[in-house]
Amino acid sequence: MKQLFTGFCLSFLLMACANQSSTEQSLYDALGQYEGITKITHQLILVIAKDERVKHRYKGANMSRFKKGMSDYVCVAVGGPCEYSGDNMQLVHAGHNYTNTEFNAIVDDLILAMEQLDIPVTTQNRLLAKLAPTYKDVVYQ
Amino acid sequence: MTMNQFLLIFITATFGCTAHAATLDIDRDQAISRSRLLATGGASTIEGAAGGGIVPMAVLAGYGAQEEQGAVAFGSYVDTGDYQLEVVGGSWSWRNRIELSFAQQKLTHDSLTKALSLPTDSISQRIISAKLRVAGDLIYTPMPQISIGVQHKKNLDFLVPGAVGAKKDSGTDVNLTATKLILGGFFNRNLLLNANLRYTNANQTGLVGFGGDKNDDKELMPEVSAGVLLNRHWLVGTEYRQKPNNLSFIKEDDWQTAFIGWFPNKRVALVAAYVDLGEVATFKDQTGWYLSLQGSF
């Protein structure tokens, strides 16, 4: 059992290293390029619309503008050939006092939207890793 | 009501809820305003605090975000052939900041009773714990989530522990824990890394009392665990817990587990594990199975 444990840890480390160097499909391509990203944003809006925790935040918002802004932002974040012309994340969310609950709710909703679109877990995780650092610019700003 | 009956009722009740919750999951658990992501509350350790099975994590039990609260109830069972451990407990977490938990353990030791002609066949222990999240977030900050915890333990059947040389029937462990979920950190699956430093003089978590003839002082014991989320419902991993060795009469080994956790929704979690507890009170090679069921509210 001790050997098993050590082996388990060693393979963890080795594979974590191999993970870094392997050549894989770019995240932009894995998401289905700009069209795929727009689909996710669209699905996310549908999920948010049913989520009591956050839907009131979007009341009266220009949803087509949100959709384009979010799609462009994600496109740039995943290294796609886009330009994001909106304000930075901190400016966009400043003054709204978004809560930790609401941030979690949006992440929850994004995961659900991606599941509904049958996006592989590995691709979901890669996108979430790109977006998670926005937390510090969004919550309680 | 014996603990077995309690466990049975608890399991029945929780699965009753599950059948209902499974249909809710399609529309994403909206009935529960507990907003942290699935599995981020971990499971319940045998000492009550949120974590894996034997190693606590810095995460707080349940799914309450920083503006919410959450509660958990659990029952766990370990069988290593010569020993059986039953645990029931629960916890309450407030604003993802503080966790208060309770665990009642009952260790049955029929083999030991037979070998030494003991007048009793079980040892019970009660554990009351508090955990404070002091910094970081499991997922959203570059630094790991860091928590400090205390576990006050009271051995309720000190006859046998006292006879084998344990000094006290109660003690308090202090835990300093760091936990990080690295998104896509393992072949693009989410990787969970956890380390705990425990300051303790408990023998076999306190079931064999506290301190002993060989050593009576508290020592720092490292504990680690790691796991991979295959998807958001399944977590596989392993734990290692270093143990003190305070008694000359009975040797104490480090503990290890390999576990699989299933989180079908935010209502319920089920953990199964293979455990290796080494030598426990004169009985060598105590390996066996662990099963834990947790309900979140």
Image (cartoon, grey):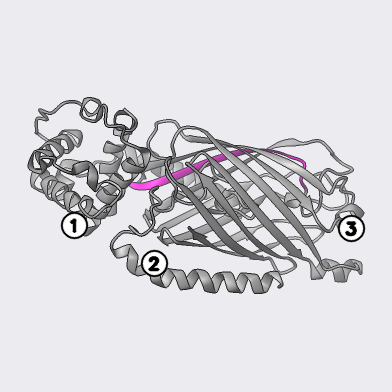
Task: Return the disc, 2 or 3, that comes first in the chain's sequence.
Answer: 2
Chain ID, mark 1: A
Residue at image location 23% in from the left, 55% down from the top: A50
Dot 2 corresponds to which residue?
B21
Q: Judge the density around disc 2: few (<14), some (14-19), many (≥20) Cα neighbours within 10 Å.
A: many
Question: Looking at the image, which residue is at 70% across and 51% down?
Answer: B127
Q: Which residues are magenta?
A: B187-202
Residue type marked 3: Leu
Image side of residue B10 versus residue A84, left or right:
right
Q: Secondary structure at mark 3?
A: helix
Please check the rendered image and state whether residue B138 is part of the magenta-colored stretch, yes or no. no
Subunit under mark 3:
B
Residue A92 x/y as whole percent: 20, 29
Q: Let me know if residue B191 is in the magenta part.
A: yes
Dot 3, how many residues are within 10 Å of its Cα: few (below 14), some (14-19), or many (20+)? Answer: some
**Residue carrying label 3:** B159
Locate residue A64: give its quadrant.
top left
